[in-house]
Amino acid sequence: MADVVEKGLRQIGVTVSRPVLAVFCIILGIILIVFPALVGIIIGIFLLIQGVLLLTDYMEIRHQQPRQAI
């Protein structure tokens, strides 16, 4: 899972070391345990960000491919 997060962050130009990412995940886990109503909001934000990353990745790949004559 950490590799997926690191790859997504690298795609948008953010680099984070594993210890920093681990501490962030622990803090986020504690917040979710204390405030369970935030689960839906956090999952929604995650899905929005992931969707944007996937769409931009697709558009970059499509833009780099040469057009073929019909």
Image (cartoon, rainbow, N blue to C red):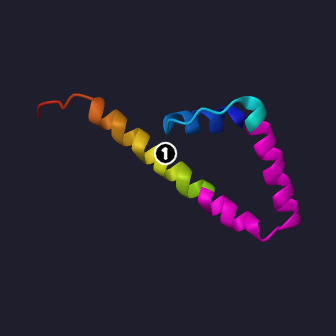
Image quarter in which the C terminus is found = top left
Which of the image's four quarters has the N terminus? Answer: top right
Residue where numbered disc 1 is placed: 53
The answer to whether residue 60 is above or below residue 36 is above
Q: Quarter-wise, where is residue 7 in the image? A: top right
Q: Residue placed farthest to the left in the image? A: 70
Q: Is residue 13 magenta?
A: no
Q: Is residue 36 inside the magenta stretch?
A: yes
Q: Which residues are magenta?
A: 21-45
Q: Position of residue 26 (x, y in %)?
A: 83, 46
So how many labels did they put on this image? Answer: 1
Residue shown at 78%/71% (left/top)?
37
Of the residues shown, which amino acid type is indicated by label 1? Leu
Q: Left of 20 or right of it: where is 35?
A: right
Residue placed at 58% from the left, 56% from the top?
47
Looking at this view, is 30 or 51 the one in front?
A: 30
Disc 1 packing (10 Å; few <14; some 14–19; many ≥20): some
Give the x, y percent position of residue 5: 64, 39
Horizontal arrangement in the rendering, residue 13 relative to residue 62 (left or right): right
Residue 55 in the image, given as x and y percentages of width and height: 42, 47
Query: Which residue does the image show at 56% across and 36% down from the upper left?
Result: 14
> Secondary structure beneath disc 1?
helix
Residue displayed at 50% across by 35% down: 13
Magenta span main SS: helix
